[in-house]
Amino acid sequence: MNRREFLIASAGTAAAIAAPSTSTTTVLYNDSAVKLDKVRPDAKDLWVRAADLPRINEFELKPQGACRADMCIPVAKTLKNGPWFNLTGFSRKLGQAYVADSGVWSFGDIPVMRGGFYSSRIAPDFAVPDRSGKIVHLSDFRGKKVLVFTWASW
């Protein structure tokens, strides 16, 4: 194969890779399922349109990075390619677990979005009445082992 034939064949392959997929993909995150009609095919990563990001996980791409509420996470240039965003690459950066099977991608909790009590393993303080009606705070038992049972009638 001469150089010209190689370049023409390579250009066709590159166009096929950059073109959006026609098959639908479903992304599961935080009790919601988002159907995406256009994703960029990739053997190991899920590339979505940056415009779909707010529907998927409430992040929005801004010049300072991927932002959600008042928090922004810097995004490497390798995670963006034109209108496409590497959602699984972003998840790896955040330490977020994900799994894919049969066109469905499921994403776990984003560790940086959790409260500090998850990493410190210290439960937030709360107050409840005991059997006699006296208000008891969890912090009253600091330094002791505590087992908390909860129940709801609804």
Image (cartoon, grey):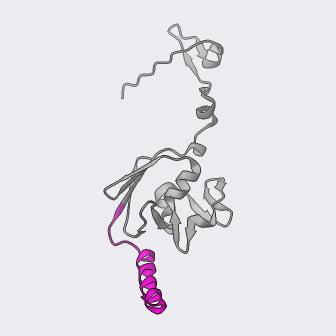
Q: Which residues are magenta?
A: 1-25
Q: Residue furthest top?
A: 132
The residue at the point 42 percent across, 79 percent down is: 13
In the rendered image, the quadrant that contains the N terminus is bottom left
The residue at the point 46 percent across, 79 percent down is: 14
123 relative position to 102: left or right: right
Up/down of 13 relative to 135, above or below: below
The residue at the point 50 percent across, 62 percent down is: 53
**Would you identify the image quadrant in which residue 122 lies?**
top right
The rendered magenta stretch, by its main secondary structure, is classed as helix
In the rendered image, the quadrant that contains the C terminus is top left
The residue at the point 48 percent across, 46 percent down is: 97
Up/down of 124 relative to 15, above or below: above
Image x and y of residue 123, in percent = 59, 26
Image x and y of residue 16, in percent = 40, 78
Q: Residue furthest front?
A: 1
Image x and y of residue 116, in percent = 64, 36
- In reply to whether residue 24 is colored magenta, the answer given is yes
Up/down of 22 relative to 34, above or below: below
**Would you identify the image quadrant in which residue 146 lies?**
top right
Q: Nearer the viewer, residue 107 or 147?
A: 107
